[in-house]
Image (spheres, coloured by chain):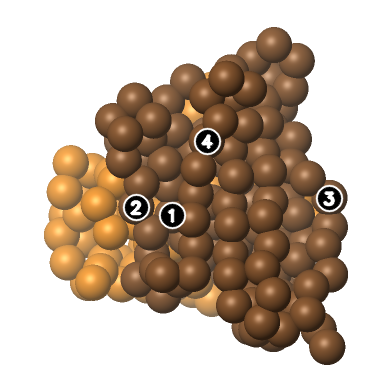
Chain colours: A orange, B brown
Amino acid sequence: EIVLTQSPGTLSLSPGERATLSCRASQSITRGNLAWYQQKPDQAPRLLIFNASSRATGIPDRFSGSGSGTDFTLTISRLEPEDFAVYYCHQYGSSPIFGQGTKLEIK
Amino acid sequence: QVQLVQSGAEVKKPGSSVKVSCKASGDAFITYGVIWVRQTPGQGLEWMGGIMPIFRTTNYAQKVQGRVTITMAESTGTAYMDLTSLTSEDTAVYYCATANLNGLPILWGQGTLVTVSS
């Protein structure tokens, strides 16, 4: 069973800064079936990135995804106040699983 | 804008069952499939299972296999998640989400809080 490990657990940054979130898989993820979600308190998750690097409909271009195999990254180029939330990576398709999340908080 | 609307919060006794529904708003229909994910209080997301009527397949997470059943009433476009033999560890917010052909959760419902307590 694949395990997804996200780092860091908490990331403290200021608006305007660049955020880099990591997701590492214990085995190679086939067909790039890796997605990123944003979740704010008392809200459902929102799809940001799928196929490792494709932005979902309506997602601002400051969000970008990259990576392949076992190492994936979500980058937020310039943080806006509304970007502070918890971010999850997710392998979908066969053996679906979520990472434990990275909390992005205001410094 | 299409939304997924889930049934309301439930309080259940240990050992009982719960059935949560999920339907697209208005005349919209769920095109490919539905995934169910739960989130225990203050914790992360746990994939529970999914149904793909187009392939006539259902898949369940090993942790809940044998206790969970996911179905879809195609005439109404409503998906259901049935969880039996509830314990306090099943206390969580349960989310449904539409899925594409690859099982990617896309559009999420608002969540349904299920509380298991004696």
The residue under the point 84% across, 57% down is B9
Residue A65: which quarter of the image? top left
B86 vs A83: above or below: below
- Discs 1, 2 touching: Cβ within 8 Å: yes
Whether residue A2 is situated above or below residue B59 in the rendered picture: below
Distance (Cα) linking label 1 and label 3:
20 Å
Q: Chain of mark 3?
A: B
Which badge, 2 or 4, comes first in the chain's sequence? 2
On residue B8, which mark appears? 3
| Front-most of residues A25 and B27 | B27
| Residue carrying label 4 | B72
* Residue B32 on image: x %, y %: 42, 26
Q: Residue flagged by tag 4: what amino acid is it?
A: Met
User: Dot 4: what SS?
Assistant: strand
User: Do callouts 1 and 4 point to residues on the same chain?
Assistant: yes
Q: Position of residue A45 (x, y in %)?
A: 63, 48
Q: Residue at x 84, y 50 (%)?
A: B8
Q: Chain of mark 2?
A: B
Name the residue tied to disc 1: B49
